[in-house]
Image (spheres, rainbow, N blue to C red):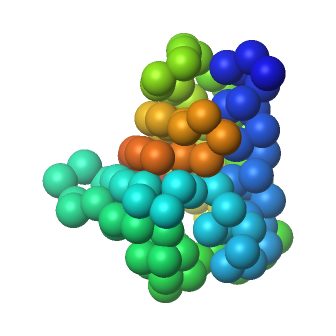
Amino acid sequence: MTDLEAVTGWVSGYVRAWASNDPTEIGDLFALDAAYYPAPFDEPWRGRETIVRRWLARKDRPGTTTFTWHPVTVGPDLSVVQGVTTYPKWTFSNLWLIRLDGVGQCREFTEWWMRQPAR
């Protein structure tokens, strides 16, 4: 599997978990000792169980978002993804830093999102 295939598979799984809020789908994305950085200057969520719990505490309602993305750079240690999340009232620009392990689970994930100006 290429690095691009691995990242594409992981992002697809993330989008499925985002849409379902299924704890197993969320947990399967992350290594047991993963770190999830939800925003600049925030402490990371550490460990799969904490990631699932914190994700579900701020979950979106299924069917309320669309997400498009493209890779900025893809490598064996770090991949960067740029995306756009559209809600009924707002649109956000996203920048993700993804570090996958050898089995395709994320060991470190940084998610930064900024609301786009109203149009």
Q: Residue at x 60, y 34 (%)?
A: 102
Observer-nearest of 31 and 118: 31
Q: Which quarter of the image is occupied by the N terminus?
A: top right
Residue drawn at point x = 54 percent, y = 46 percent:
106
Please identify the residue farthest to the front as the structure is shown. Answer: 102
| Side of 113 relative to 25 (left or right) | left
Which of 16/92 is in front?
A: 16
Residue 94 can be seen in this image: no
Quarter of the image containing the C terminus? top right
Q: Residue at x 17, y 53 (%)?
A: 41
Q: Position of residue 15 (x, y in %)?
A: 74, 54
**Image point 56% across, 56% down: which residue?**
30
Up-down relation of residue 1 to residue 97 (above or below): above
Count of labels shown? Answer: 0
Answer with left or right where residue 9 lies relative to residue 42.
right
Locate residue 16, reporting x and y percent.
79, 59
Q: Most extreme residue toward the left, as rendered? A: 41
Q: Quadrant of residue 46?
A: bottom left
Please provide percent x and percent y for residue 48.
49, 68
Q: Nearer the viewer, residue 13 or 84?
A: 13
Q: Is residue 89 something one can see in this rendering? A: yes
- Image coordinates of residue 45 in percent, x first then y, are 34, 66
Residue 1 position (above or below residue 92): above
